[in-house]
Amino acid sequence: MSIVGKSMETKVVVGFAGIGLMGSPMAKNILKAGYPLIVWNRTPSKYEEHVKMGAKPAATPKELARKSDVIICMLATPEATEDVVLGKGDYAGVGIVDGLKAGKIVVDMSTNMPDVVRRLAQAVRAKGAEFVDAPVIGSVKPATEGTLTILPSGKKDVVDKIMPILQTMGKKIWYIGEEVGLGCAMKLTMNLHLHIITGAFAEAIAFGTKAGLDPALIVEIWNNSIFKTYITETKGQKVLANDYSPAFLLELAAKDTRLAIDMARNIGATVPLGSLVEQLYNAAIIQGMGKLDYCALAALYERLNNTKISKAK
Ligand SMILES: NC(=O)c1ccc[n+]([C@@H]2O[C@H](COP(=O)([O-])OP(=O)(O)OC[C@H]3O[C@@H](n4cnc5c(N)ncnc54)[C@H](OP(=O)(O)O)[C@@H]3O)[C@@H](O)[C@H]2O)c1
């Protein structure tokens, strides 16, 4: 079954693997746009709402691929994505590639390594199918509102074919290039910057608070000066409220920095600040903060400095 020419008369069937914090609202937006949706998740309870909304569950990634024209992955790590797509580990013989045939398209939207998505593309193309990496910028709120920024790379004609589906999840879609993996390289570039400024924010607010300054005033001045960033604006309020409920798990932020460091090693680049932030995230995980939002780096700095940033008593 080919996606070519299907969108007009027959709806393209979309398969979604990975109903997590991000995948759940992204899959709902595909459904709301009217696409027939098949869902698969390691933990089936997470797609109950999607099934109530009309999605059909698949028992395995292979079944998902067999029943869908376009198969989207939004999984936690490169290791999990390799297992699910290539049919390795727990998914031996029932991976996405095991259900593929010519004309289908696999789209990896998770934050992944360029080398890994190139391996996935090779295996997918060996089945006559196509592959696009399309990682996203934005967290649960834009994922829910359908306003993610999406960074697809792969053959232009294939990206054009899936564009209407990407547009159900994102508003700004930047085509990064023909070579699979460039989207992931762009995403890791964005997140290396994000995590370094998160570390800078946590260190500076703890430093200022220790000096006797009001942390709320520090955040207010940041946000009313040229120093305003997404972190000072959005995460600043969360940290002041001692609210570390996760939009993006700290353990996945640690994963992002690890991927950037691994990629730097592969390409012969040097990322000393990234290495430092990875160590900070690792320290926070050791302190039991892995399942909190990544801005809990500020809570780590509270402990390191024996000070209290949050306004909450
Ligand atoms: N959250 C954000 O703000 C954000 C923003 C941009 C990009 N991302 C990226 O998007 C991806 C998903 O993030 P998320 O925040 O949605 O994470 P999440 O809530 O932890 O969800 C992760 C998903 O991966 C699945 N999974 C994990 N390990 C698996 C394994 N070994 N085998 C099969 N499935 C496995 C989980 O299944 P279970 O439900 O069974 O655990 C779940 O569906 C990550 O690559 C992340 O870096 C996240």
Image: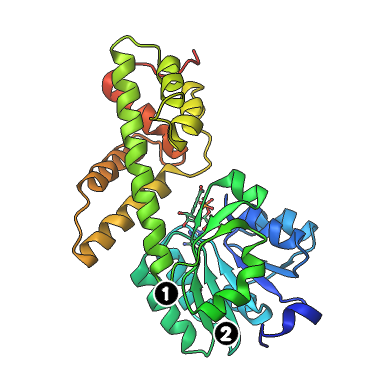
Q: Residue furthest front?
A: 226
Q: Secondary structure at mark 2?
A: loop
How dense is the environment of label 1, judged by Cα within 10 Å: few (below 14), some, or many (20 and up)? many
Residue 169 position in % (x across, y down): 63, 58
Q: Nearer the viewer, residue 209 or 254?
A: 209
The answer to whether residue 302 shows anywhere in this view is: no
Q: Residue at x 44, y 35 (%)?
A: 231
Disc 1 from disc 2: Cα separation: 19 Å
Q: Nearer the viewer, residue 297 or 263?
A: 263
Q: Amino acid at mark 1?
A: Val
Q: Amino acid at mark 2?
A: Leu
Of the residues under marks 1 and 2, which one precedes in the sequence?
2
Q: Residue at x 43, y 22 (%)?
A: 219
Which residue position is annotated with label 1? 180
Taking 134 as reference, is 281 left or right? left
Q: Quadrant of residue 89?
A: bottom left
Taking 51 as reference, is 103 left or right? left
